[in-house]
Amino acid sequence: MDTTRRGVTLGRVEWDRAFEIGIPLVDEQHHRLIDLINRLSDVLNGDAPDEAEIEHIVAGLIDYVGYHFSAEEELMDRFAVADAAIHKRQHQNFTKRVTAMRQETATDPKAMTDLAIFLQNWLISHVLTTDKRLGQQVAAKVGR
């Protein structure tokens, strides 16, 4: 299966302290998500990407995202953060979009590259904006 577009090489997301939101559990989960996305990019960048390995990585990534979103949403509820509904809606929209993109890969193998790019961009943007606000709101509630 040809899972790449000619001339497209997926970059890697390098962990940076700028991604830390000040909640160690969430920071560890974000780091793990970056590792999983990088693993997918590495496989897609290979000379002969293995379809079974790609599917295994994507399935694991989607499962872990669900676990991570549940953990964040539990924190939102526990600390009654102001924009929890908006944040949860972003999680729901992400899940719907990834599900749709994953279905596209069944008929268009090159869509996997689009999925990997989307995952990278969305995670970086979401962590640096929405999740940063979550960290700030939780810190304010616990007096840090």
Image (spheres, rainbow, N blue to C red):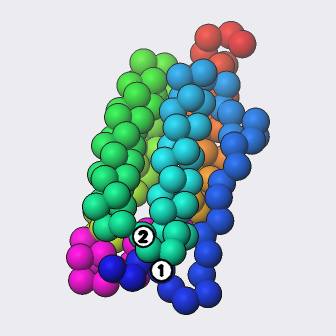
SS for dot 1 = loop
Span colored in magenta: 103-119
Image height check: is 37 above or below 22?
A: below
The residue that mark 2 highlights is 49
Q: Quadrant of residue 75?
A: top left
Q: In terms of secondary structure, what is the magenta stretch mainly?
A: helix
* Quarter the C terminus occupies: top right
Q: Magenta stretch containing residue 72, yes or no?
A: no
| Residue 89 visible to an observer of this rendering | no
Nearer to the camera, 109 or 29: 109
SS for dot 2 = loop
Position of 13 with respect to 107 (left or right) is: right
Kindly report the distance in space between the C-alpha atoms of the residues bearing marks 2 and 1: 9 Å
Toward the right, the furthest residue is 17
Image height check: is 27 above or below 94?
A: above
Q: Position of residue 88 (x, y in %)?
A: 40, 43
Q: Amino acid at mark 2?
A: Pro
The residue that mark 1 highlights is 4
Q: Amino acid at mark 1?
A: Thr
Measuring 60% from the left and 81% from the top, which residue is drawn there? 8
Measuring 76% from the left and 36% from the top, which residue is drawn there? 17
Nearer to the camera, 142 or 122: 122
Sequence-first tag of 2 and 1 = 1
Toward the front, the furthest residue is 47
Q: Position of residue 24 (x, y in %)?
A: 60, 21
Toward the bottom, the furthest residue is 6
Nearer to the camera, 129 or 30: 30
Measuring 42% from the left and 70% from the top, which residue is drawn there? 49
Q: Number of labelled discs?
A: 2
